[in-house]
Image (cartoon, helix red, strand yellow):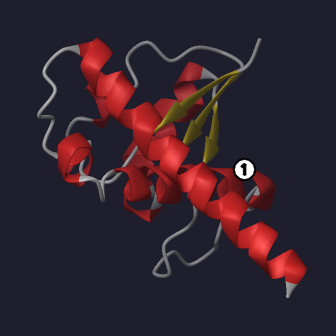
Amino acid sequence: MAKTVFLTPGQAADCAQAEALLAGLGQDETVIGDREYDTDAVLELIKRAGAAAVIPSRSSRKSPRPLDRETCRAHNLAERFFGKIKEFRRGATRYDKTARNFLSAVHLAVSRFLLRRFANQLFESRA
């Protein structure tokens, strides 16, 4: 079964920690990352593990690599979702120290987004 690994900005400062992050990588896995991970060293680590890399090419790369647009769209959607959750001060600062309470705060934030979206669709359909 295929597994996906996300590399997010700031997770590996200048790719110095990429080897540690990709240590348990195996065959049939996909590594999704931002442009900052488009280095030959990181791509070589992924290739040696037998995994697939979905990382957009930097503009300075002479020959851009092909890119799976659908996977990048899904990654972008997930990044924007977590960005919206971080708008809530309670979630961004981790006031809730236990995992159970933090998860309940995330559930409340998601509920608010879904209700707002549903209400907007309802009012737009009546106009």
Q: Please determine whether, in this image, residue 32 is positioned above or below residue 117.
A: above
123 to 39, vertically: above or below: below
Residue 55 in view, yes or no:
no
Residue at coordinates 24% horizontally, 51% vertically from top-left? 10
Quarter occupied by the C terminus: bottom right
Figure check: 100 above or below 7: above
Residue 37 appears anywhere in the view: yes
Q: Position of residue 28 (x, y in %)?
A: 72, 20
Residue 101: x and y in percent read 26, 20
Compare residues 20 and 71 and report the one nearer the observer: 71
Please tell me which residue is depicted at 66% across the width and 15% down the height of the picture: 27
Residue under label 1: 71
Is residue 36 left or right of 72 when viewed as pictured? left
Horizontal side of residue 2 vs 63, given as left or right = right
**Quadrant for the N terminus in the image:** top right
- The residue nearer to you, when weighing 97 against 40, is 97
**Residue type marked 1:** Thr
* Side (left or right) of 61 relative to 126: left
* Residue at 15% from the left image edge and 35% from the top image edge: 94
| 33 and 79: which is toward the camera | 79
Q: Which residue is nearer to you in this view: 86 or 126?
A: 126
Residue 68: x and y in percent read 76, 55
Give the answer, above or below, for where 52 lies relative to 38.
Answer: above
Give the secondary structure at mark 1.
helix
Tell me residue 21's x, y (percent). 33, 27
What residue lies at 51% left-to-right and 75% top-to-bottom?
61
Q: Residues within 10 Å of mark 1 (few under 14, many from 20)?
A: some
Q: Is residue 96 left or right of residue 125?
A: left
Q: How many marks?
A: 1
User: In which image quadrant can residue 52 be found?
Assistant: top right
